[in-house]
Image (tube, rainbow, N blue to C red):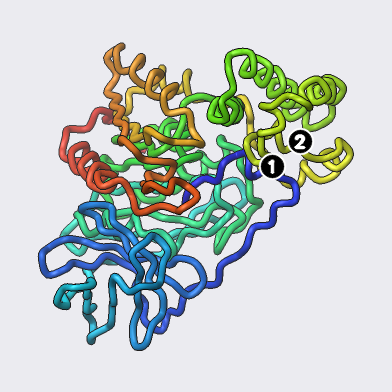
Amino acid sequence: MHMRSWSILFVLMLARSVCAAPDTSHDLLGAWRLDDGSIVTIAPSADDTWRFRQIKDGSSGRLHPHADGWQAGPGFTDRDPAALVVRMEGDRLSWMASGTDARLAERVAVQERDIEWQVEGATLRGRLVLPTTPGPHPVVVLVHGSERLPAVGQWHEPYMLAAHGIAGLVYDKRGTGLSDGDFTANFQQLAADAAAGATRLAALPEIDRNRIGFAGFSQGGWVAPLAAKKFGAARAVLVAYGMVDSPLHEDRWQCLQAVRSDGGGPNDLAEAGKFVDAAHQVLTSDLREGWAAFKTEVRRNHDKAWFQQLEADACIAASFAAYPAWVVRTFARRRLPPGIDWRYDSHTLLADSSTPMLWLLASDDSEAATTDTVAAVQRLAATGKSFEVAVLKGAEHGMLMFGQGGREAGPTGYHPEYFTRVLAFWERVFAEPAVLSKNP
């Protein structure tokens, strides 16, 4: 469910592989309680594999089919050497880490209800996952990142929430999975979709209409606060590894960060900034204007070290410069996120909001400008708003952690505090008196 770097979306010849659904002869999707009381969630991963996530410490791995069960290696995606072997034993799991005795895990019982709602001519379809305890329950509407993939039956978050007494709604974004309509990156439309889902929930007897929250991940950081405003009665909003500033700001930051990481100095950064700004003029004109100025910037910087080191996936400007202009004009429009407002930011929205929020950010995020978002949220919190910001040290985008090999070696797991911080926030705000009393 994580947002790909905007720049990667603009590498014109990029092809995205589609993973097959995992073998569901044994359905592992859900939350499982180990015999020490800890919770692990399992959800589909690539091809015929599954991903487990330990909620208490963020450890994670990919479960590959093996013999009469599944096997995970020591890394985030490895199969060998075996570090964990999982087998079905009746309706329970045998969970055996390398060098330890097998432990048993029982599936956490939940209620699941498929629901749908209409938004501007499209039918959106989702799944509500509820605890089995008596309701009405608080609920979190889970808001997508930029991925063009369905979420129902794929995300672990609603099961994690339900295992801790909170309902979760996951739904297929319009134009994906079982939801119809045209796929879009228009934040207003995406927020309207999420808000309508919350309104649908508020009419259900199982849901406490005064305890409905939104959680937005990555691109969802722009959408979730906007959805809360459209809904009008949100108890709280959580944003994880998202941004306050605009997509243009994000792309500019990514480009300058790449130049800085390659040793670029102040003059290089100034030149790169002009290069990016010229590309953004082209981008925001729907590729119709600004080409002469952009080509001038390309020619002027072509032989400079920072330009030569800038990879095509570093930012939009680098992607545009990597191909002849006619290729960009011919193919880029079909590959850009449809309907996106490149200048949209959340500053005015947040300044007018009285909804409690937690911004959970990654200190080493290479896709989102964490420092800028921290400053923006802290300025608003200083005015008396119930806004919190927490930065998880060492985490990358998606709250992933990397070892000594860095990004090239792949992640090692999630930040050890990520899942527990998310749960602690929702448990606290749903236990507090409502800040807003208005009902949808």
Residue 161 quadrant: bottom left
Nearest to the observer: residue 216 or residue 197:
216
**Mark 1 and mark 2: Cα distance apart in space:** 8 Å
Q: Position of residue 156 (x, y in %)?
A: 36, 59
Give the residue type at disc 2: Phe
Nearest to the observer: residue 370 or residue 305:
305
Is residue 200 placed above or below 256 in the rendered structure?
A: below
- Quarter occupied by the C terminus: top left
Q: Are marks 1 and 2 in contact (CB under 8 Å)?
A: yes
Give the residue type at disc 1: Phe
Q: Position of residue 426 (x, y in %)?
A: 24, 42
Answer yes or no: is residue 123 visible. yes
Residue under the image location 44 percent in, 21 percent down: 372
Residue 167 quadrant: bottom left
Residue at disc 2, secondary structure? helix
Residue under the image location 33 percent in, 35 percent down: 360
Q: Which residue bears the numbered disc 1?
A: 10
Residue under the image location 23 percent in, 78 percent down: 93
